[in-house]
Amino acid sequence: MAYKITHRTAEQQLTFPNREAAERYAEQNGGGRDNWTVDVATQAVTPRERWVGR
């Protein structure tokens, strides 16, 4: 299932193939998990190049 992370103060959203990848990105590259919300991506994300954290 695809997940997206949204930055709490900046208008930035990134989509990931799974929750683990989304949380890992937020922790390692996004300034910490507390700066992001993690939600299920409600729209299909294509093409594959849009995935982050693969």
Image: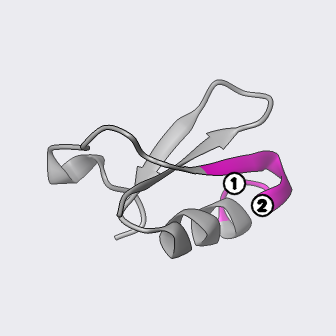
What residue sits 69% from the left and 54% below the top?
Answer: 30
Visible residue check, residue 32:
no
Residue 30's disc is: 1
Residue 47's disc is: none
With respect to residue 15, does 33 lie above or below? below
Q: What residue range appears in magenta?
A: 29-38
- Percent across and percent down for residue 24 are 61, 72
The three-letter code of the residue at mark 1 reads Gly
What residue sits 42% from the left and 46% below the top?
Answer: 41
Is residue 14 toward the left or the right of residue 47 in the image? Answer: right
Q: Tell me the element at label 2.
A: helix
Which image quarter is the C terminus in?
A: bottom left
- Percent across and percent down for residue 3 are 46, 55
Of badges 1 and 2, the one in the foreground is 2
Write down the residue under mark 2.
Answer: 33
Q: Tell me the element at label 1.
A: loop
At label 1, counting other C-alpha atoms closer than 10 Å, the crowd grade (few under 14, some 14-19, many 20 or more) is some
